[in-house]
Image: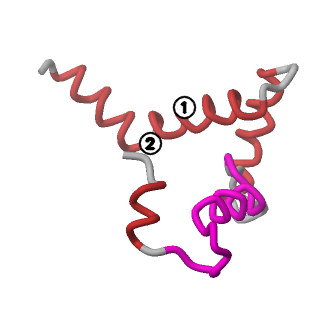
Amino acid sequence: MAAGEEQSREYLRRHRLPELLQRLGALLLFHRPERPREFLIQVLERVKAGRRGEGEYPFLMDEANVDAMFSLLDVLGQGYIRPAQYREGAPT
């Protein structure tokens, strides 16, 4: 591998850019805003504020989404799921 390529990979890894770009893409597809550029700017401003401790980091899912997913696995309404249920519902 060429030195320039290795430096580029290290730069991407150090700044966690692949994860950020993947998250931004997922947020775009989830919300499908009318103005995607403005949406991305707002998300990045929220990320920036969250890093400064001035707000929350933007999540793809909120608590209601997590509750809905849990209820799909907890079909008997027991308030918990077994490890086997988790493994069945977890992406592979």
| Residue 78 occupies quadrant | bottom right
> Quick check: 35 above or below 26?
above
Tell me the quarter of the image containing the N terminus.
top left
Q: Which residues are magenta?
A: 60-81
Disc 2 secondary structure class: loop
> What label does residue 16 carry, if any?
2
Q: Nearer the viewer, residue 58 or 50?
A: 58
Q: Report whether 8 appears left or right of 25.
A: left
Q: Report whether 42 appears left or right of 77.
A: right
Tell me where residue 26 appears, x and y as whole percent.
62, 34
Q: Amino acid at mark 2?
A: Arg
Q: Report whether 1 appears left or right of 87.
A: left
On the image, numbered disc 1 is attached to which residue? 21
Q: Nearer the viewer, residue 48 or 73?
A: 73
Q: Which residue is pictured at 71% across the width and 50% down the height?
A: 58
What whole-number distance in Å separates the C-alpha atoms at marks 1 and 2? 9 Å
Q: Which residue is pictured at 44% across the width and 42% down the height?
A: 16
Tell me where residue 52 appears, x and y as whole percent.
69, 60
| Residue 62 occupies quadrant | bottom right
Tell me where residue 85 appears, x and y as whole percent.
45, 65
Q: Amino acid at mark 1?
A: Leu
Mark 1, Cα crowd under 10 Å, few <14 / some 14-19 / many 20+, is few
